[in-house]
Image (cartoon, helix red, strand yellow):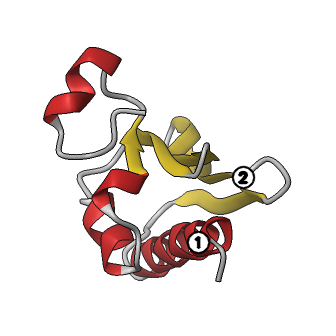
Amino acid sequence: MDKIKLFQKAILHFLNGYLSDMSRTINSDVQYKILADYENNSFQLLATGWNGKHYVFGPLFHFDIINDKIWMQCNNTEREVVDELMANGVSSQEIVLGFVPPNARLHTGFAAA
């Protein structure tokens, strides 16, 4: 399996698993959707809807595949996503924490870019 397909599969496995786990505990009118753009290698779990009197709209997770690496652009949860990606065959040096400043990425244990 080529690297891009492996990355796509690992990301979608994580997003589907997270969504499945959430579906057992969700108690609101917020809907969650996985957005998968295979052409541009961009993947997201989006929340939208009403939680009581508050409107919710935004990503829980966003990933891009850029230059043979998974860029985690957004993680708005406490979930240790990188551990789950690595359990699905992605090495730490193939993961970039895009939300970490470039000069600090060298100290994360993951790829700098």
Q: Nearer the viewer, residue 54 or 64?
A: 64
Residue 2 located left or right of residue 56: right
**Residue 31 has which mark?**
none
Q: Amino acid at mark 1?
A: Leu
Q: Position of residue 48 (x, y in %)?
A: 63, 47
Residue 11 located left or right of residue 25: right
Q: Nearer the viewer, mark 1 or mark 2?
A: 2
User: How far apart in space, not on screen, are marks 1 and 2 (Cα)?
Assistant: 11 Å
Q: Residue at x 58, y 75 (%)?
A: 6
Q: Position of residue 28 (x, y in %)?
A: 49, 61
> Is residue 76 in view?
yes
Q: Quadrant of the N terminus?
A: bottom right
Q: Residue at x 66, y 62 (%)?
A: 34
Say which residue label 1 marks. 12
Q: Amino acid at mark 2?
A: Asn
Please say if 38 is above or below 97: below
Please say if 7 is above or below 92: below
Residue 63 located left or right of residue 113: right
Quadrant in the rendering for residue 29 = bottom right
> Is residue 49 in view?
no
Q: Residue placed farthest to the right in the image? A: 39
Q: Position of residue 87 (x, y in %)?
A: 31, 79
Q: Quadrant of the C terminus?
A: top left
Say which residue label 2 marks. 41
Q: Nearer the viewer, residue 57 or 75?
A: 75
Q: Residue at x 56, y 67 (%)?
A: 7
Q: Earlier in the sequence, mark 1 or mark 2?
A: 1
Task: Assign a secondary structure to mark 2.
Answer: loop
Please say if 99 is above or below 9: above
